[in-house]
Image (cartoon, rainbow, N blue to C red):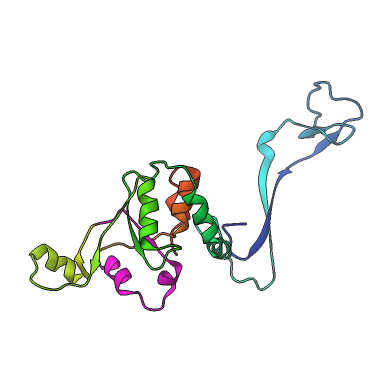
């Protein structure tokens, strides 16, 4: 069950509330028997439901002992599943590279923090193939600065090109101390960062995937 941490599987079933009348002959459109909610065929393989409002969805969650405290996650996928997926990110990337060009990322301007599956140049080339752009932000500052550059320098950038989306590696997000680059973006007001697989999944699918499924916790 993706959105509950610690679960191993989910059984979804419909439980009939009320009494089922067991027919002794073929169902031929008879009215509901008094005192019952449904009719069941003699073979017990067919059910005629008269009171559908009495059918409620029921969820049965199975989990291992000591699997940890249950925690709801908004993106519908467990951390363990994400880790397994990212462990094979190379295959996902190769599939994206061989996908036919399509302007999936029109209007998107990306910034990247940390080590991606390939070189910065290769990632930028891939993004541009599919209609996106990559920001050219530089860290640090030196020399005489205009007031605008001084402002950006205060936050850690010598030049700043505002991204619409920031892709950050798991290592960067998970580090005890944020890197200078990650902290600089946070200083500029960016608080939401996304995983690398968002790019490749969107390219392969041919459309932008739901962002909430790829946010770092």
Residue 190, given in percent of the width and then of the height, sits at 30, 62
User: In the rendered structure, which segment of residues is drawn in magenta?
Assistant: 162-187
- Residue 192 is left or right of residue 9, and the answer is left
- Residue 162 is left or right of residue 197, and the answer is left
Q: Residue at x 42, y 64 (%)?
A: 116
- Residue 22 is left or right of residue 65, and the answer is right
Residue 129, given in percent of the width and then of the height, sits at 38, 47
- Which quarter of the picture shows residue 21? top right
Q: Is residue 185 magenta?
A: yes
Name the quarter where the N terminus is drawn: bottom right
Residue 75 visible within the image: no
Q: Nearer the viewer, residue 24 or 63?
A: 63
Tell which residue pokes out farthest to the bottom in this image: 176
Name the quarter where the C terminus is drawn: bottom left
Q: Is residue 210 magenta?
A: no
- Which quarter of the picture shows residue 104? top left
Residue 183, given in percent of the width and then of the height, sits at 30, 71
Vertical comparison of 4 with 37: above or below: below
- Which quarter of the picture shows residue 4? bottom right
Q: Nearer the viewer, residue 115 or 32?
A: 115
Residue 87, given in percent of the width and then of the height, sits at 55, 65
Vertical comparison of 72 with 142: above or below: above
Q: Residue at x 21, y 61 (%)?
A: 160
Q: Residue at x 78, y 33 (%)?
A: 38
- Residue 202 is left or right of residue 54, and the answer is left
Counting labels gives 0
Residue 101 visible within the image: yes
Vertical comparison of 112 with 58: above or below: below
Vertical comparison of 124 with 208: above or below: below
Q: Residue at x 41, y 59 (%)?
A: 194
């Amino acid at each position: 069950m993706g959105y509950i941490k610690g679960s191993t599987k989910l059984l979804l079933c419909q439980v009939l509330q009320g009494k089922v009348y067991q027919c002794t002959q073929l169902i031929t459109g008879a009215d509901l028997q008094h005192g019952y909610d449904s009719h069941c065929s003699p073979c017990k393989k067919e059910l005629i439901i008269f009171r559908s409002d009495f059918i409620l969805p029921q969820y049965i969650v199975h989990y291992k002992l000591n699997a940890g405290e249950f925690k709801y996650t908004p993106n519908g996928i467990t951390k363990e599943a994400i880790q397994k997926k990212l462990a094979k990110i190379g295959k996902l990337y190769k599939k994206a590279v061989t996908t036919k060009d399509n302007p999936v990322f029109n209007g998107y301007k990306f910034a990247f923090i940390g080590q991606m599956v390939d070189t910065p140049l290769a990632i930028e080339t891939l993004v541009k193939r599919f209609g996106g752009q990559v920001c050219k932000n530089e860290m640090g500052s030196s020399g005489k600065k205009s007031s605008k550059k001084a402002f950006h320098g205060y936050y850690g950038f010598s030049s700043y090109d505002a991204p619409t989306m920031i892709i950050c590696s798991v290592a960067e997000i998970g580090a005890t101390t944020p890197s200078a680059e990650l902290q600089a973006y946070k200083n500029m007001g960016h608080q939401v960062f996304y995983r690398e697989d968002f790019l490749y999944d969107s390219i392969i699918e041919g459309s932008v995937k739901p962002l909430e499924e790829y946010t770092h916790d």
